[in-house]
Structure formats: C-alpha cells, structure tokens
Amino acid sequence: MALVIIGTGLAGYNLAREWRKLNPDAPLVLISRDDGSSYSKPMLSTGYTKQKSAAELVMQSADKMSAQLKAEIRTFASVSAIDAQAKTVT
C-alpha cells in the first residue's frame, strides 16, 4: 500500500524525504494542485521583492523531485474526499 501525501509544498516534500529514508522501496504518491515544483519558502518573499518570476524561483521540477524521491507525483490534481476507513483518496 502506498503512502499518499497531499501537497508538494515544503511540508509535503520534507515528509516525503523523511518517510523515504525509513521506507526506501515502498510506494509513495504525492498529489499537488499546482505543477509540483519545489521552492525555498524564504526565497518566495525575497524573490517577490526582487521582481523574480515564479519560474526563476523553482529549485526542482516535479519530474526531478519524483526521481529523487522515487515517487509518483500527480500534478494539477485535486482531492475531493479522503476515506480513511476504506483507505482511498478521490
């Protein structure tokens, strides 16, 4: 059974990294409403004041994060329901 993480922000990617250390071969899925790019949160405000575009602030693309984490990253996807008992996410 896969671990499903909703969100590819700092918390989502940090959880994925730590979980991957403990479970190097287990299935891992991250779901993101955006393109899944990895950003440094402090750089968002600094970048804004320096008039940098979002693309200039990307540290890693979702594809690179997927390879690094050995995970499936579903981008531009929304979660409408979580059924913990049935262990499903829709």
Image (spheres, helix red, strand yellow):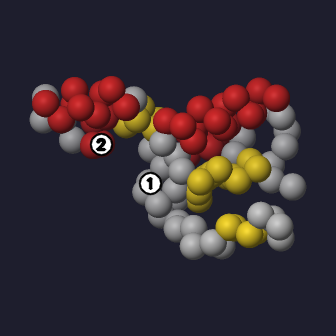
- Which image quarter holds the N terminus? bottom right
**Which residue occupies 48% across, 49% down?**
36
Q: Mark 1 belongs to which amino acid? A: Asp
**Which residue occupies 74% across, 34% down?**
19
Q: Is residue 85 above or below residue 19?
A: below
Q: Earlier in the sequence, mark 2 or mark 1?
A: 1
**Which residue occupies 43% across, 57% down?**
34
Tell me the element at label 2.
Answer: helix
Name the residue that disc number 1 marks. 35
For mark 2, does the 10 Å Cα neighbourhood hold few (<14), some (14 to 19), or many (20 or more) residues?
few
Q: Is residue 32 above or below residue 68?
A: below
Tell me the element at label 1.
Answer: loop
- Which image quarter holds the C terminus? bottom right
Q: Mark 2 belongs to which amino acid? A: Ala
Which label number is shown at residue 84?
A: none
Name the residue that disc number 2 marks. 55
**Which residue occupies 13% across, 29% down?**
50
Between the residue at mark 2 and the residue at mark 1, the CA separation in whole angstroms equals 11 Å
